[in-house]
Image (spheres, rainbow, N blue to C red):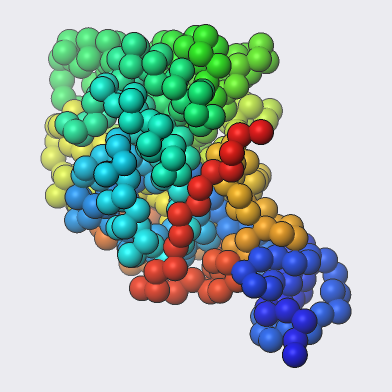
């Protein structure tokens, strides 16, 4: 009878012993016998990535992605938990019935574990308690139109009431922070329909105005606030200043704001369209400096897929926005030299996901084996997305994931073992 189920030996930072789906020991020469041993010499053994921001659009728009392909793509890139957004699925996850439908779709097809964001939209504040009861990780609100008719932007009163209720429930509110007034006004006054016109319609100032407003409401209500996909160093600075004066706030950025910019949008077109948009060099450098200073809490993909047909056309305003990238999250973190805690421990602890994001005894044995020295050009054919486009295609990325384990077993596409991860109660 072996001591443990699985021993991953010889990797960095040491041998990892796994039993009954959990890590039981990490270190050099553990002296344990195992039913199965995997040689990881020359590889890094990392906690599986926790991607705090993906859209899999299932149920309702599974033809855009879906749980099967989305989770398989994430797993191929070393991600073992995704936190999935309430919109782009239909119905959007704004009440108990919609949550149950989302959960059923995920359980039927996801090869990795998942947590679910609920939605905060006008009219559903009385539904937040039932969503909390069912296990949402928090509530996502848009401060500008989401682009999806069935997921309305939260006006300030909805945001304020929603934050007060979320605070009572002990869950965070995540905001897409761009001013609806500024972006709508600039869009209406745009004189052209090209990429530069689109960029000009969503300036950094629109982001700053919305972040400041969300911070004021979080301060007033005592709500835990998370600002998703901050695109500028100035935005991060607003968050850091608020945190310094005691507001419970964190922020994320995405790989695309670090490794791509305005010139890439002009070069690549629709495949690189997102909101907030890619930024000018000075803002990217400033964002990077803020990240290096420790002011960015986490890195998430904001994987936002769509059929290629929706990513075609010359009208920069009309073409669908959203970047496909969940398969490359960990590799992009390694490529950009972002500490890997920002895609594992940090999101797991901010969202209080038990057992996730840590390489330590007691944690779930969610692991990515990575050849961190490999540097390979990303090819469209390797992508497991339903629609194989991404602005990262053609880029040289560091880190090749050789195996991904979920709770001690290798993840196999088409073998759905994913479970809902419910947040721990607040301390
Ligand atoms: Zn998103």
Vertically, is 348 above or below 201?
below
Left or right of residue 272: residue 418: right
- Observer-nearest of 94 and 272: 94
- Can residue 322 be seen at all in this image of the molecule? no
Q: Residue at x 45, y 54 (%)?
A: 420
Q: Position of residue 48 (x, y in %)?
A: 58, 58
Left or right of residue 325: residue 305: left
- Observer-nearest of 31 and 302: 31
Locate residue 296: give its quadrant. Answer: top right
Left or right of residue 371: residue 268: left
Which image quarter holds the N terminus?
bottom right
Q: Which residue is drawn at 73% across and 79% down?
A: 4
Q: Residue at x 62, y 69 (%)?
A: 21
Q: Which residue is drawn at 85% across and 70% down?
A: 28
Which image quarter holds the C terminus?
top right
Vertically, is 10 above or below 71?
below
- Observer-nearest of 204 and 16: 16
Q: Where is residue 213 in the image (x, y as percent from the top left)?
A: 44, 10
Left or right of residue 294: residue 385: left
Locate residue 269: give its quadrant. Answer: top left
Number of marks present in the image shown: 0
Q: Position of residue 379 (x, y in %)?
A: 38, 62
Q: Position of residue 67 (x, y in %)?
A: 33, 58
Vertically, is 146 above or below 345?
above
């Amino acid at each position: 009878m072996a001591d443990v189920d699985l021993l991953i030996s010889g990797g960095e930072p040491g041998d990892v012993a796994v039993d009954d789906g959990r890590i039981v020991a990490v270190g050099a020469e553990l002296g344990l016998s195992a039913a199965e041993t995997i040689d990881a010499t020359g590889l890094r053994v990392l906690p599986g990535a926790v991607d705090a921001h993906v859209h899999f659009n299932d149920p309702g728009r599974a033809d855009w992605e879906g749980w099967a392909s989305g989770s398989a793509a994430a797993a191929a890139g070393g991600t073992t938990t995704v936190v999935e957004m309430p919109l782009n699925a239909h119905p959007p996850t704004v009440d108990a019935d919609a949550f149950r439908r989302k959960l059923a779709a995920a359980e039927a097809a996801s090869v990795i574990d998942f947590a679910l964001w609920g939605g905060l939209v006008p009219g559903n504040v009385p539904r937040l308690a039932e969503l909390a009861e069912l296990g949402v990780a928090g509530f996502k609100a848009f401060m500008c139109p989401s682009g999806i008719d069935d997921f309305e932007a939260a006006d300030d009163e909805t945001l304020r009431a929603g934050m007060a209720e979320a605070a009572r429930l002990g869950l965070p509110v995540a905001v897409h922070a761009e001013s609806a007034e500024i972006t709508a006004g600039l869009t209406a006054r745009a004189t052209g329909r090209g990429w530069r016109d689109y960029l000009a319609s969503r300036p950094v100032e629109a982001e700053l105005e919305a972040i400041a407003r969300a911070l004021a409401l979080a301060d007033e209500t005592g709500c835990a606030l998370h600002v998703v996909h901050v695109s500028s160093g100035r935005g991060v600075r607003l968050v850091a200043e608020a945190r310094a004066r005691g507001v419970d706030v964190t922020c994320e950025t995405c790989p695309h704001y670090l490794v791509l910019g305005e010139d890439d949008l002009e070069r690549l077109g629709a495949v690189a369209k997102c909101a907030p948009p890619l930024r000018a060099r000075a803002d990217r450098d400033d964002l990077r400096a803020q990240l290096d200073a420790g002011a960015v809490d986490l890195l998430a993909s904001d994987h936002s897929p769509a059929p290629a047909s929706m990513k075609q056309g010359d009208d920069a305003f009309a073409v669908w926005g959203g970047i496909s990238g969940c398969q490359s999250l960990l590799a992009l973190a390694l490529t950009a030299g972002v500490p890997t805690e920002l895609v594992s421990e940090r999101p797991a602890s901010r969202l209080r996901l038990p057992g996730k994001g840590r390489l330590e005894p007691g944690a779930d044995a969610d692991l990515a084996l990575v050849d961190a020295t490999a540097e390979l050009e990303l090819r469209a054919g390797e992508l497991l997305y339903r629609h194989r486009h991404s602005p990262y295609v053609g880029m040289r990325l560091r880190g090749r994931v050789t195996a991904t384990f979920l709770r001690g077993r290798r993840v196999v596409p088409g073998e759905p073992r994913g479970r809902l991860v419910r947040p721990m109660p607040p301390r």
